[in-house]
Amino acid sequence: MDTFFNSIIQSSSCDGEVKNIALKVADGERITTDEALSLYQSAPLSLLGMLAFAVKERNTGRRVFFNRNFHIEPTNVCVNNCKFCSYKKPKGDAQAWELSLSEILHQVERYRHSRATECHIVGGVHPDRDIDYYCNLIREVKNIIPGIVVKAFTAVEIEYMVNKAGLSLRDGLQKLKDAGLESIPGGGAEIFNEELRAKICPEKTKSSKWLEIHRTAHQLGISTNATILYGHLETYAQRIDHLNRLRTLQDETHGFSAFIPLKYRHENNSMSNIGEVPLLEDLKNYAVSRIFLDNFPHIKAYWVMSGLETTRLALQFGADDIDGTVNDSTKIYTMAGVGGKPVMTVEQIVDLIKSENLVPVERDTFYNIIKEYDD
């Protein structure tokens, strides 16, 4: 451990327990769930930031990753009724949409000659669309842009389409992979605590099933991401339990590419009365996530959800990825009250990262480096 770093920890105003945990982190040792709880409850934000940034530097240096991507959202009609959701609308609602295959492919066509490397497909769990529909969609996307990586369908969508087809989970995922699915996003994890999950999303995929879907995907060579929905009714202990289940699965499979903390946004849903947690809580959550998830290669600050200023600060609290260009192609967070159109140019992303004295790196879905902007 660096002597200067050690002296900063020793001279900090925090209690002895937190100092000992900080020294473990500085030495690259894994912390326990109890120690993570102590960091949430007692560690100064400045110390958390220093520790998380040190872990980030140990993993990826001063690099911050992004990609050129766009989203396709086939529908926001959904069989589930999650209390935190601002996205789902019933059939016939003025804000509901059910894009036809030709309408979806028209959107994809716009990117045929772009330099996008990833097509991200998620949406509501539509009651009438089956696995064959989505396999055909993947194939058609790749017909239009042969080199594109299709990262698609949350575990919640996958569970529904596989069950509807009467397939085993492994056979269903293999069918999707054979159609061209290469990666799965991390959505639908929400919070793994079963009691709280039953309150806020009772119809949604169970925690154990979410983990099973990702485990099976990893076994089939499909990379995935993981998320948490934080800042609603959960406790610190429930957050740590969630992180610990992910860390345990990652120890087993090594199949997760990135972890993405997703902040609960309160507009236009049935939990709006609880409000939102402040910025300091966002930064604390990024930091503890980076420290605890020692086997996750990347922590993503999804700028569409967090906003540009929070994203900028998150890069000093352990995040080393900010997602991609997006190109105004998602409505999930704008419908929940996040202002502005979700679009950034490569130049804007590079400038944002450089403003934090960090090195922008354009990547593909699998974190292969396309270009490093180190001049």
Image (cartoon, rainbow, N blue to C red):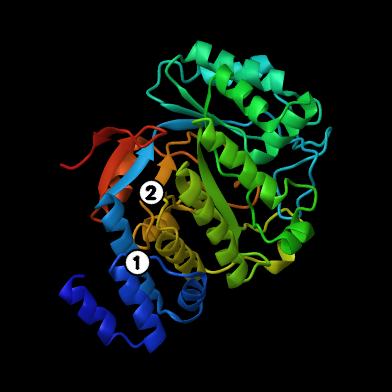
Q: Is residue 136 above or below residue 36?
A: above
Task: Identify which residue is drawn at 58% across, 20% down.
Answer: 138
Residue 46, visible in the rendered structure: no
**Can the viewer see residue 312?**
yes
Mark number displayed over residue 29: 1
Q: Which residue is mark 2?
A: 297
As drawn, 113 above or below 296: above
Image quadrant of residue 180? top right
**What residue is at 57 percent from the left and 15 percent from the top?**
139
- Neighbours of disc 2 within 10 Å: few (<14), some (14-19), many (20+): some
Q: Residue 302: x percent and y percent? A: 47, 48
The quadrant of the picture occupied by the N terminus is bottom left
Front in this rendered view, residue 100 or 9? 9
Q: Residues within 10 Å of mark 1 (few under 14, many from 20)?
A: few
Seen as rendered, the residue at the extreme top is: 143
Residue 231 position by quadrant: bottom right
